[in-house]
Image (spheres, rainbow, N blue to C red):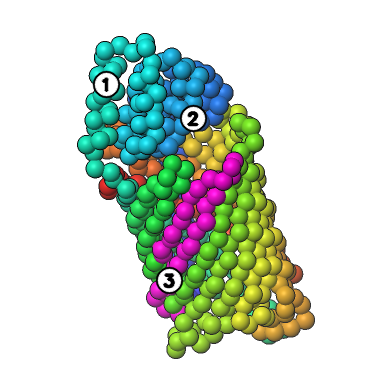
Amino acid sequence: MKLYTDNVSLRKIFDIKVRYLLFLGLFFIFFSISPSFSSEKNITYMQILQKPNDLDLNLKYAQQQGKMGNYKQTISTLERLTMIYPENIEIKLYLLSVLVQVDSPEKATTIIEEMKLRTDLSPEDLESLKEIEEEILDREPSLWNIAADIGFGLNFTDNVNSVSKTRTKMDSDAIAEFNSALFDRTESGSLGITATRPIGEESSLLLNFAHTTSNQYKEADDDFQSYGFTIGFDTTLGNQSLSPYLIANKSDAQHDADSFSFMYGIGGFFSVGERNSFSYGYSYSDSKANHNSSDLTAQETNSISHNYTLGYDLIITQIISSSLSLGYTDNDSVVDAGNDAETYDVGLVLNFAFPWAFISVGNSHSFNDYKKEDTTVNSNRIRSDHSMTSDIMITKALGDFFPALDPNRTLFMNLSYEKLISEGNILNYDYIADSFAFSFTKSLSIMK
């Protein structure tokens, strides 16, 4: 691999990082002044939890969520308001209009029949009910909602090959030079098509097709195209929300063996009170790679993995929320040495839902215990690692800067920084890596 030892290359790398850091500073300046560009302040879910009986605040939140296409949250808010203010006809009419919009005729018809029994309805209210009822009867049911998600991103890293701190490594029980390249950048683009349809009042089916392309500037490890297909089902059982799923994925590497993976699992969560929720999950995955002339050892890492997760989410204030996660993975490969491992994960994330931006700060630890020594590296020691990852991510809608370009605030800019510190009992795995990433994401409704 090419060494970056000449002054010209180092100067180019330095210039790239300086320009990127300058852009980062300008981005933060925009954040600090952005409220002056916003036509109205976004209302957060935490604010709703703080003031659940505030009619004006809740109605504005329902309208805001409806504009964003989050009709489930809109309906939930309006249904709660109808219980708090049962005599308010306007709220029920608003709820009916949303139910018709999202094709929920059964629930809308039930509300209409209940309202017809009331004796305090004005002639105008009765006429509105009649119009809604006729619209339900005349409307062709739309079973599927289809949306597209588009993304583009750039990633800059200062240690793409996980070069050790000492630039040395163990190779067949001997210390050798670790002269792989450090600096690199990767460009990526993604397209996802998601189709959903309701099944009854409490369940829905999801189909998703996703394509990702990745291009690495200097090397070729991240030059690939991937294709994924997901089938998911959301339902409820008592107070539990359950989501079984099945995922198939294929990755076409430009200079390596193609790989295939198959995964199925289930996730669930339940709430305790207004501020606490618990989540859990299990997944089984089967990963395989082609055996070809460009990579004669690809099939050695074919593996089966079992993964278990637990999570706890807490709403601390109307601005701050937190997420605690625990995970365990058992990986069994065709060739045990250097591949079979048990991994233990723990992570904590703090989310800040400011009116001017959403900020997420996280810290996670991963402990890897391998099951058999790798004689190509060190035949006298079984590998054991600990890695710590710290990251910060900032998300902002482009419409907050330029309302004319993004009036519905559906185009999001994401800026993130990540620092990875790895420590192991074999010097190959003692390294530090920093990376910056910038991306755009947008969701488009194709059919309702």
Which residue does the numbered mark 3 point to in the structure image?
251
Residue at the far right in the pictured view:
380
Would you say the magenta stretch is mainly helix, strand or loop?
strand
The disc placed on residue 128 is 1
Three-letter residue code for mark 2: Thr
- Residue range of the region highlighted in magenta in the rendering: 228-257
- What residue is rendered at 43% in x and 17% in y? 56
Q: From the viewer's perspective, is the residue at label 1 or at label 3 nearer?
A: 1
Q: x%, y% of residue 15?
A: 43, 55
Three-letter residue code for mark 3: Ser
Viewer-side residue, 298 vs 392: 298
Q: CA distance from mark 1 to mark 3?
A: 54 Å
| Label 1 or label 3, whichever comes before in sequence order | 1
Residue 176 sits in quarter: bottom right
Q: Are marks 2 and 3 in contact (CB under 8 Å)?
A: no
Q: CA distance from mark 2 to mark 3?
A: 38 Å
Residue 11 visible: no
Q: x%, y% of residue 18?
A: 46, 51
Which residue does the numbered mark 2 point to in the structure image?
44
